[in-house]
Amino acid sequence: MRFPRRTLLALSLALPALSAFAAPLVMGFSQVGAESEWRTANTSSVKSAAKEAGITLKFADAQQKQENQVKALRSFIAQKVDVIAFSPVVESGWETVLKEAKAAGIPVILTDRAVKVTDESLYVTFIGSDFVEEGRKAAKWLLDRVAKSTAPAINVVELQGTVGSAPAIDRKKGFEEIIKSNAKIQIIRSQSGDFTRAKGKEVMESFLKQKDKKIDVLYAHNDDMAIGAIQAIEEAGLKPGVDITIISIDGVRGAFEAMKAGKLNVTVECNPLLGPQLMQLAKDVVAKKPVEKRIKVIEGVYTADQAAKELPNRKY
Ligand code: AHR
């Protein structure tokens, strides 16, 4: 009698004594791209954790394009991988390809970013940060600071992440939810910087050129855009972190260096080191063990006065 490969794998994962005879589990992983320091850390976490876990990883970089991710997913299905994991560049437009994976009997794990689908059975589980909460944390820090200020108005400019992506949508939502409790705080301009330093700098330059309103605060949806914007602010003859308060998200090493130099005021942590948990999940999913539908990552908030002490401890 012949058993399908996935059944043998599931058996060997459930009965460790058999694992010596099983072929390694094969994971197809479609990554968003290499747009930020965060992403680079996430990619190396996934690659090294796969190696550590004895999982064969088929890795595809989508260069921030949904069509490339759809192609990669279809190629993983054609190759009959044991499990697919991916970090979707945008939230919508996944229904068709996820149905194809389901029809092929290949379980899908979402990592880092979520999808919007009407049928939640199209993926098994989602492991990643709570982006709405990150936006709330950023805004709460600002509310505290504004409470100590006598300024009649606080003008905020916002650098959004990739249009249509879960972190851009959710970080905006969480931030707005909290700042609405203080009418002094207004977002006067908001544009996408696509999560990259180059775009962050370019968009900040255009914000600074519009002289109708003074900019008090920059809220950047990630550290890379904030670092790009810092350059633009300095080139405009202003002091980042002093003339313009800067709030960002991720907590990458570059942000800690900027905080240490007094150029960035606060960063909300978004942990990219998801690899080890993802590999364990993949093993459990293939072995048909029950897993949580949503697994959140626990994260903190770091301010400039903590940067020098915390910098040597940063792992990404
Ligand atoms: O999805 C996570 C976000 O994507 C990170 O905050 C950002 O830096 C990355 O590009």
Image: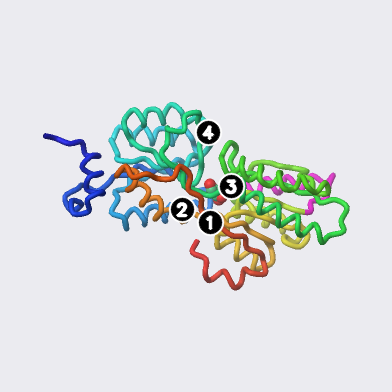
**SS at circle 2:** helix
* Residue beneath disc 1: 298
Marks 4 and 3, Cα distance to the nearest angstrom? 15 Å
Pointer 4 with pointer 2, Cβ within 8 A: no
Residue 258 at x, y = what percent? Answer: 63, 63
Residue found 70% across the figure and 52% down from its top:
139
Q: Do we see residue 34 in this rendering?
A: no
Residue found at the far left of this picture: 1
Q: Which quarter of the figure has residue 72?
A: top left
Q: Do we see residue 240 in this rendering?
A: yes
Residue 243 at x, y = what percent? Answer: 78, 60
Q: Is mark 3 within 8 Å of ligand 1?
A: yes
Q: Which mark is residue 116?
A: 4
**Crowding at mark 1 (Cα within 10 Å: few <14, some 14-19, many 20+):** few
Vertical order, 207 against 265 (above or below): above
Q: Is mark 2 within 8 Å of ligand 1?
A: yes
Q: Which mark is residue 42?
A: 2
Instruction: Choose the circle earlier in sequence order: 4 or 3.
Output: 4
Pointer 2 with pointer 1, Cβ within 8 A: no
Marks 3 and 1, Cα distance to the nearest angstrom? 11 Å
Q: Main secondary structure of the magenta part?
A: helix
Task: Report the mark closest to the observer, 2 or 1.
Answer: 1
Instruction: Choose the circle earlier in sequence order: 3 or 1.
Output: 3
